[in-house]
Amino acid sequence: MLTAVSKFRNKSGLASTTRVMPFFLSTSATATATPLCPPPSPYPSPHFRLPSPPRRGLAFLAASAPQRDLFPTPRQAMASLATSTAAAAAAEVTHLSQRDAADIDEQLMGPLGFSVDQLMELAGLSVATAVAEVYKLSEHTRVLIICGPGNNGGDGLVAARHLYHFGYKPFVCYPKRTAKPLYSGLVTQLESLAIPFVPVEDLPQDLSGQYDIVIDAMFGFSFHGTPRPPFDDLIQMLVSLSVVGDSAKRPPIVSVDIPSGWHVEEGDVSGGGIKPDMLVSLTAPKLCAKKFTGPHHFLGGRFVPPPISSKYGLELPPYPGTSMCVRIGKVPSVDISSLRENYISPELLENQVMPNPFDQFRTWFDEAVTAGLREPNAMALTTVNKAGKPSSRMVLLKGVDKQGFVWYTNYGSQKAHDLSENSNAALLFYWNEMNRQVRVEGSVQKVSEEESEKYFHSRPRGSQLGAIVSKQSTVISGREVLQQAYKELEQKYSDG
């Protein structure tokens, strides 16, 4: 048996805890396995029913949300939804003329101290991360990068290297190589990775059969005039590809900064140019990006310093977290029924599983932490009230040992109310990147007041005050109510 602990507010405003006694722990992995009982989901889920030792507290401590800004502003509250924020503000994004784009490059590589290779590296990384964000490796493995002779082509060479390290299989078509050390060095780097260079004459007229993505890195904002051979034919090859009726049967086209052949300000003047599925604008979108009608528009090149933003009045969307790209414009609608995932992972057989499920959980949890998963201790907690109505929410695991899983809440929350009526609860850990889920079910019991007090006093002072002020699952008239209550409590306990 396992036990879970949940933290509730006591009369003094501090916290006491409860324990949950789960009756089984089930693990799930997307691998070949013979389950001991039928799996509850499409995943092969071997279940491990635990024996029933004496009822003693194991520790499911239902964790509260992680401590962040106590009263975030609306913008901060939406930080994790930066894509939506960027989409809503797409109309406000600055678009650059050809002259301004050139001037900004001169400023960056002049008084602001950037080098060409540095900007190229950041741009290429941005392209690769944008591609990886939209086109899953499991479905779009083979990537053809068509590189021109200038900086745009250099961005493509850098993107090819990063895509290789992301797990993709890049192929590079680079028909007009330059002898400059910067470019020859990029070629050498790709050759050291055994990335194939494909001559123009070896490309099939129809790219659909051999490649899953095509990246157009031929010409950037400095190009003007009419493309010359072999790039004129390469552009026409992509034009032919982009007019295929069924987009599901052709590789998507990703253009770097501007679609090759477009006028940098007026766009596809003739109407017969490349129609990319994704455009990755660099530094700031160029005016031609207003004519882009594809589903995926990203901004890359997270290096614009304040002097540039101020001088040119740049309004650019904030980049989420540590990302090197951010979506611009409306997120395309998705047919939910068409979503598919090809799960590929090593086999998990019953004879490979540890006899003790706690040991197995600990091993898998450590692997999730080592893999760099964001908040691997996040888990869904499901409670049921006396009427049989279930309720789920995300909480954080705060401890696990032979007595159970530890989490915290307060007496005023909905989960606490549910547990007072029905002590049964379920936990679910879902580690998507590792194709694993762990399910634990059982009953909740309080832990000792000593343990509860110890945890409460281990929290930062701001977290303690916030826990007292924030009455979970209750309606308030506005943010100012919490802010005022917090201020009063802070003054009351100003001496610590």
Image: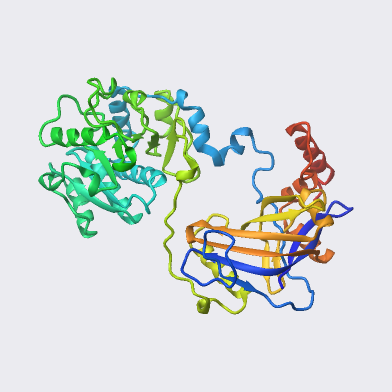
| Residue 323 visible in the snapshot | yes
Answer left or right for 158 relative to 433. Answer: left
Please determine whether, in this image, residue 402 is positioned above or below residue 256: below
The quadrant where residue 152 appears: top left
**Protein image colouring:** rainbow
Total marks drawn? 0
Question: What x and y, as percent, mark residue 457?
Answer: 77, 58
Q: Residue at x 26, y 51 (%)?
A: 170
Q: Residue at x 63, y 33 (%)?
A: 74
Question: What x and y, as percent, mark residue 323?
Answer: 45, 44
Question: What x and y, as percent, mark residue 48?
Answer: 62, 73
The quadrant where residue 156 appears: top left
Quadrant, the N terminus: bottom right
User: Could you say which is closer to the camera, residue 60 or residue 31?
Assistant: 31
Please determine whether, in this image, residue 292 is positioned above or below residue 463: above
User: Could you say which is closer to the camera, residue 410 or residue 169?
Assistant: 169
| Residue 410 visible in the snapshot | no
Please determine whether, in this image, residue 23 is positioned above or below residue 333: below
Q: Residue furthest front?
A: 38
User: Could you say which is closer to the camera, residue 161 or residue 31?
Assistant: 31
Answer left or right for 54 relative to 164. Answer: right
Please determine whether, in this image, residue 145 is positioned above or below residue 102: below
Question: What x and y, as percent, mark residue 166?
Answer: 36, 54
Answer left or right for 496 relative to 180. Answer: right
User: Could you say which is closer to the camera, residue 491 or residue 193?
Assistant: 193
Q: Residue at x 24, y 59 (%)?
A: 193
Q: Residue furthest right?
A: 11
